[in-house]
Image: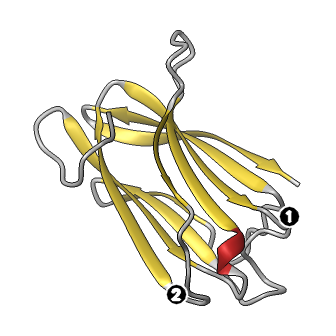
Amino acid sequence: RNPRPGGRGHERQFTLSITTDKWSGETAFFLRHDDDDDDDDCILASWSEFYFSHANYHLTYCLPIGRDYAVELTDSYGDGICCSWGNGTYWLDVNGSRLFDSNGTDSFGRGVRHRIRVEEMGSILVDTHIEV
């Protein structure tokens, strides 16, 4: 089941905001469950239709509390979205609280994976793994 836009009750609103670099078509996004005790790490949402260079995109989903999620950005060419080709940037918010901001300085190579935990009283960034 795909997470739905908005945020109610036992859900928190997750937003990925991204400004693409010159080669926006190389970028893709994936959101999946990432619980240590669960084999259900299926893709909940994905987006690879970043058609416009140097454009702003905001992808918002409702995520049930009490779970961990993997937020993945990939670059098919392997040079990330930063620096050499137009200063792409991205950030992750849950219910308006910023969990991560690349500040236009993180060139993640082939991909980056952030693990976030959505909780009742707030959400946290658990870890980040960069694939170069």
Q: Quadrant of residue 65?
A: top left
- Inspect the image, locate mark 1, and give the three-letter code of the amino acid beneath it: Gly
Instruction: Name which residue lies at 66% across and 75% down.
Output: 25
Secondary element type, mark 1: loop
Camera-side residue of 80 and 26: 26
Write down the quadrant of residue 117 in the picture: top left
Residue 6 in picture, x, y percent from top left:
18, 54
Q: Amino acid at mark 2?
A: Ala
Q: Position of residue 15 (x, y in %)?
A: 38, 59
SS category of the residue bearing label 2: loop
Q: Residues within 10 Å of mark 2 (few under 14, many from 20)?
A: some
The residue labelled by disc 2 is 55
Residue at (39% x, 71% y) in the render: 58
Which mark, residue 91?
none
Is tag 2's residue or tag 1's residue first in the polypeptide sequence? 2
Q: Residue at x 72, y 90 (%)?
A: 86
> Is 3 left or right of 31, judged from the image as shown?
left
Q: CA distance from mark 2 to mark 1?
A: 20 Å
Q: In this picture, is 54 found above or below 41?
A: below
> Which residue, given by chain and number where applicable, does mark 1 sit on?
78
| Relative image position of residue 5 (x, y in whole percent) | 23, 54
Q: Nearer the viewer, residue 72 or 2?
A: 2
Kindly identify the residue that appears in the image at 11 percent across and 36 percent down.
9
Q: Is residue 37 left or right of residue 118?
A: right
31 relative to 50, above or below = above
Tell me where residue 28 appears, x and y as whole percent: 62, 61
